[in-house]
Image: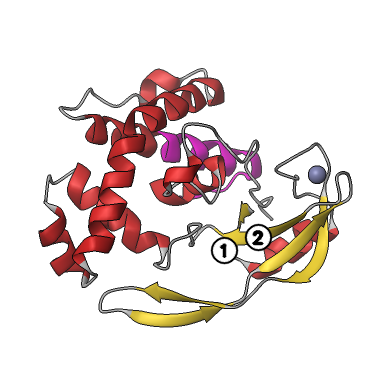
Amino acid sequence: MLTVSHDPAAVESQLLGRELPCPRCEGRLRPWGFGTARVIRCGTPVESRWFTPRRARCRGCEATHILLPAEFACRRADHADVIAQAVELGAAQGLRHRKIAAILKRPESTVRDWIRTFKTNAPAITEAFTARVHRATAEALEFWPAPAKTAVANAWGMLMAHARVLSQLHGTAAGTVVTMTWHQAALFAHGPWFFSPAGWPDSVQHQPALPRQR
Ligand SMILES: [Zn+2]
C-alpha cells in the first residue's frame, strides 16, 4: 500500500510516467486495475462515501500495491481529516476522548483508539519526523517547534514543522506555494499506516510519492 495524491488525474499521469516508487524495492509502479470498493466516513455530521482505490504493480518485484489517496489512512474507516482533527483536539487543546467524540460525532471507542494509537506512537513519530525535518532543510531551525509539555504535543508540533518544510520544498521546485496539512504531509512521508499501530516504529514508505507540480 502506498499513499498518493488525492487527485486521480495526477496519480494516473504518475503511473503512466513511471514516477511512482515501489514501497518494497527500487522499481516503479504501473497501472494494475482497482482494489475493492469501501465506504469512508467523512466530515461532521458523518457522510458516508464510496471509494474504489487504484491498484498498481511494480515492474521490478512484481508485487501489487493499493494506492491510497492522502485523505485516507490504512485500516481506518474514517477520513484522515477527522482522525487528524481528533488528534489535534487532544494534542493541542488537551481535550479528553469523550468530548472529542461528541464534537466529531463518532463513537467514543473509535476516538479513544485513534488517540491511544497516536499517544503510543508519539515518541517514534517525534524521532522519525525530527530526522525528516533535519534531512529536508539546512534552515531547519526556522521551523523548529518549541518544546511542549507532553509527548503527544511534541509529536504534533514536529508534524506541523514537517508539513511546513514539505510545503516549502515542494512549492519552491515549481515556483508555486503549496499548503499541505500536517496529516497529509505525514501520510505522504510515512505511508498509509501513519495512524495505525502497525505502522510504527518502522517507516513503511521509503520515499514520498508526491506528484510533480505543473
Ligand atoms: Zn517493487
Q: Is residue 207 left or right of residue 122?
A: right
CB at disc 1 and ligand 1 closer than 8 Å: no
- Is residue 126 toward the left or the right of residue 36 in the image? left
Query: What residue is drawn where x is 32% and y is 73%?
Result: 43
User: What kind of residue is marked 2?
Assistant: Leu
Q: Which residues, given as a range, are shown in magenta?
A: 162-181
Amino acid type of disc 1?
Answer: His
Check disc 2 and report the residue beneath it: 67
Residue under circle 1?
A: 6
Gap between marks 2 and 1 measured at Cα? 10 Å
Secondary structure under the numbered disc 1 in the rendered image: loop
Q: Relative to 41, is 197 above or below?
A: above
Q: Classify mark 1: residues with Cα within 10 Å, few (<14), some (14-19) or many (20+).
A: some
Q: Residue 166: give x, y in percent of width and height.
A: 51, 38
Camera-nearest residue between 207 and 78: 78
* Residue at x 57%, y 48% (from the top left corner): 176
Give the residue drawn at x 48%, y 62%: 71
Image marks 2 and 1: residues in contact by CB distance under 8 Å: no
Q: In this view, does 76 lie above or below 38?
A: above
How far from the left and from the top, in percent, is residue 171? 56, 43
Q: Is residue 30 left or right of residue 178?
A: right
Q: How many labels does the image show?
A: 2
**Where's residue 88, x and y in %?**
25, 49
Disc on the earlier residue, 2 or 1: 1
Residue 112 in percent (x, y) is at: 23, 55
Residue 143 belongs to the span the image colors magenta: no
